[in-house]
Amino acid sequence: MVSKNKDLSQSDKPQVPDASAFCFGIVTAEWNPQITNTLLEGAGQTLKQFNCKQENIYSIRVPGSYELTAGAHFLLQNYKLDAVICLGCVIQGETRHFEFICNAVANGLTELSIKSAKPVIFGVLTTDNMEQALERAGGKRGNKGVEAAVTAIKMAGLKIRFLLQKWGFSLAFLNIV
């Protein structure tokens, strides 16, 4: 695996577009709050680091990771958003419940992204144990909430880039390429 032993939370600032013109939704699962609260904090701080205004961030909580898809859908229906970041944590247990939840969330978020024509970012930790989750929520593997926010900004910028090109606008003056 390419990312083994690598903290991917360190972003190269020049490659991340300015987020001042974008609006984002964040849906955070309440289950495993020790993890999800840290992911949310990282995502929020990162959006602000790249100039997203607080009033352009719409954040809600849902009971668990399974409900992330519905929460993202609610946000997309009620706000004019450029992307939605979905944050959760599913830890492997003794039953196949882990597989069902992970597959349902991944497929649901992908389908929602395609149907809405908006980036819906999968910021869900799917780990074998709590130690792995903690490593990815501010520990030695970084904060995957940060990575999800950077992904959302980049995808919002990419969509704008394609829309502007479609209408024949020059992109030279914008910091979204």
Image: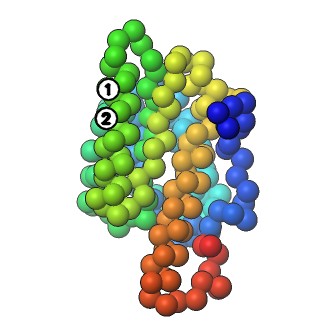
Quadrant location of residue 63? top left
Q: Does the residue at mark 1 contact the one at mark 2 (Cβ under 8 Å)?
A: yes
Looking at the picture, tell me which residue is in the foreground, 14 or 58: 14
Look at the image and tell me in which quarter the N terminus lies: top right
Q: Residue at x 59, y 22 (%)?
A: 132
Q: Say which residue label 1 marks.
A: 100
Image quadrant for the C terminus?
Answer: bottom right
Return the residue at label 2.
104
* Position of 170 relative to 32 (above/below): below
Quadrant location of residue 31? Answer: top left
Q: Could you tell whether 92 is left or right of 80 in the image? A: right
In the picture as drawn, the residue positioned furthest to the top comes out as 94
Q: Pick out the residue farthest to the front.
A: 1
Query: For numbered disc 2, what is the local secondary structure?
Result: helix
Asked if 37 appears above or below 56 in the picture, the reply is: above
Q: Which mark is residue 77?
A: none
